[in-house]
Image (spheres, coloured by chain):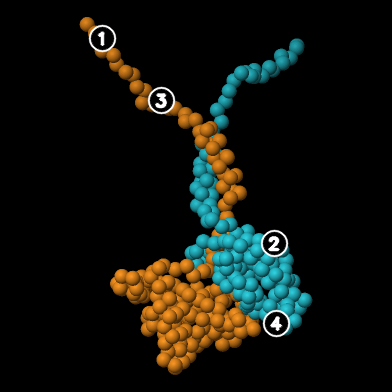
Amino acid sequence: MGKRFKLHIDRNAEFELDLAPLLAVMVKLVPVLLISSAFVQMMIIETELPQVVQEAIKKQEADPGAAKISVAVTKTEGVKITLTEKGQAHIEVVGLNQDKTIDYPALHAKFVELKKSHPAVFKIDIQPESDVAYKDIVKVMDEARKAREANLKFPVKDEKTGKETTTEYMFPEIVFGNTMDG
Amino acid sequence: MARTRVKVNIKRSQTFGLNITSLTDMFTILLVFLLQNFAAGDVVIDPVDGVRLPSSMTDKNPVDGAKVSISAKEIKFEQKVVAVIANNKVDAASLDAHDDQFIKPLFDELKKLNVDKEKLAKTGKVLLQADENLPYDLLRKVMYTASMAGFPNLKLVTTVSSN
């Protein structure tokens, strides 16, 4: 008669995992990543945009009667926004805070308001005064480029399909208008 | 009475197991952190000494172009100093006698780039690294000169900011 073989499993037995090869890989990887990592991440401000927005900008450039927005940044008065439409200029000023800095939330709200009333305009002229700090110009550009609220979208027409779509971009095409003034 | 010498019994052939679990844990955390910060962009921009870049919410990765930097002390093209700055003013010797917006040495270097790196020059892109506290007047001179040299596509290099 055959004897039934019984496998003895010791459920309380412990085993040690050999972590040495894993550690060896990590020791090699960490210095490589330390050398190649960029701890200060740098980005650029440029004008590469979604196709639909780019086409809308082209359309605006081709239309001589389109509304034009000019943004003058000054150290003493704040930001002066000039909207030129049908030969008439409307000027609005976003003043300075008590600490003599630009009121950026108010400026952003003004840009949103302008975009809502003129959804076809994507390009603005920025004209900072000579003594305005570079960081202030970058901040003004930031406020104008995109809507801060994630669910705030603006209508834009896809010229190829004719369909209406939306974009979070407000005024992504920012041109330094006074560079060549001399 | 003679003292008995204590003899420590050392087994030289004995091995011991080093517990490396905690070390592995530490390395795993470090590795995850480094992988997150790993720069995956095509173009690497080296920070310029003395230039504190402004922060922006832009999410565009750097592209290749002529690298110009402006610090409080000098204007550099790539690594070469092309003009000296003192009190936020470009050294008069570097400016054109008839046009105070025109930085002659920078123009010459950019023109040279048109010959040396024709493909790059054709893009007309300038990567501008400028100190955040500099006045616009200085930037305008560089922009004006770059435009005159055939580099009108200005790319402003910034650091990343979430707000």
Q: Do labels 3 and 1 share a chain?
A: yes
The answer to whether B31 appears left or right of A85 in the picture is right
**Marks 2 and 3, how far apart at CA:** 64 Å
Q: Are marks 4 and 1 on the same chain?
A: no
Image depth: mark 2 or mark 4 in front: 4
Marks 3 and 4 share the same chain: no
Examine the image and state in which quarter residue B80 appears: bottom right
Where is residue A33 shown, x and y percent of the image?
Answer: 56, 47
Q: Is residue B111 left or right of residue B157?
A: right
Residue B79 image label? 2
The vertical placement of A25 against B61, above or below, is: above
Distance Cα–Cα, label 3 vs label 1? 27 Å
Q: Which residue lies furthest to the top in this view?
A: A1
Disc number lying in front (3 or 4): 4
Answer yes or no: do the residues labelled 4 and 1 have beta carbons within 8 Å?
no
Label 1 near label 3: C-beta < 8 Å? Answer: no
Q: Residue B98: percent from the left, percent from the top?
A: 72, 83
Gap between marks 3 and 4 measured at Cα? 86 Å
Residue in the image at 52% along x and 86% along y: A80
Q: Position of residue B44 (x, y in %)?
A: 58, 57
From the viewer's perspective, tell me whether residue A131 is left or right of residue A83. right
Compute the Cα span from label 2 to label 4: 26 Å
Q: Mark 4 points at which residue?
A: B99
Query: Disc 2 marks which amino acid?
Result: Gln
Residue B111 appears in the rendering: yes
- Give me the disc on residue A13: 3
Quarter of the image holding residue B78? bottom right
Quadrant housing the N terminus of chain B: top right
